[in-house]
Image: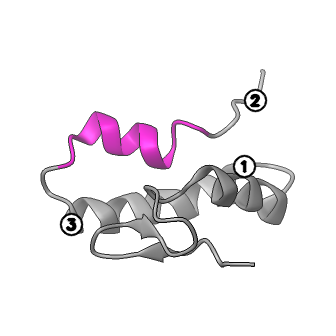
């Protein structure tokens, strides 16, 4: 089974070639990090910063949606 890792500087998935994090990796990350999403959000935020440097033409709002917008929101 292919690993779904980021492949900078294009930030595509090594497993399926889609934009990273692809849907498969999103599911894997949710399972891996489990519980509270704060640690996952910090990890993805660091990926967002690195990707922003590699992909300067990627609009900030689109980058935010791609890296963080798919995270489930907790109800307060």
Viewed as shown, does residue 74 lie left or right of 51?
A: right
Viewed as shown, does residue 5 lie left or right of 1?
A: left
- Say which of 25 and 15 sits in front: 15
Tell me which colouring the rendered structure shows: one colour
Q: Which residue is mark 3?
A: 53
Quadrant occupied by the N terminus: bottom right
- Image coordinates of residue 4 in percent, x first then y, are 61, 71
Q: Secondary structure at mark 1?
A: loop
Q: Which residue is mark 2?
A: 74
> In the rendered structure, which segment of residues is drawn in magenta?
58-70
The 10 Å Cα crowd at callout 2, few under 14, some 14 to 19, many 20 or more, is few
- Image coordinates of residue 66 in percent, x first then y, are 44, 44
The 10 Å Cα crowd at callout 3, few under 14, some 14 to 19, many 20 or more, is few
Q: Please name the residue shown 51% across and 44% down the image.
A: 68
- Say which of 55 and 68 sits in front: 55
In the rendered view, would you say 55 is above or below 35?
below
Q: Earlier in the sequence, mark 1 or mark 3?
A: 1
Location of residue 55 (image quadrant): bottom left
Q: Please name the residue shown 72% across and 49% down the image.
A: 37
Q: Which residue is mark 1?
A: 37
Magenta region, main secondary structure: helix
Quadrant occupied by the C terminus: top right
- Image coordinates of residue 65 in percent, x first then y, are 43, 37
Per the rendering, the mark at residue 76 is none
In the rendered view, would you say 56 is above or below 1?
above
In the rendered view, would you say 17 is above or below 22?
below
Q: Are marks 3 and 2 in contact (CB under 8 Å)?
A: no
Q: Secondary structure at mark 3?
A: helix
Viewed as shown, does residue 64 lie left or right of 31?
A: left
- Image coordinates of residue 50 in percent, x first then y, are 32, 69
Q: Secondary structure at mark 2?
A: loop
């Amino acid at each position: 089974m292919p690993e779904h890792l980021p492949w900078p500087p294009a930030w595509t998935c090594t497993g399926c070639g889609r934009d990273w994090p692809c849907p498969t990796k999103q599911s894997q990350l949710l399972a891996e990090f489990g519980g509270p999403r704060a640690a996952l959000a910090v990890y993805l935020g660091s990926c967002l910063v690195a990707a922003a440097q590699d992909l300067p033409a990627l609009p900030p709002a689109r980058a935010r949606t791609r890296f963080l917008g798919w995270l489930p929101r907790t109800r307060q």
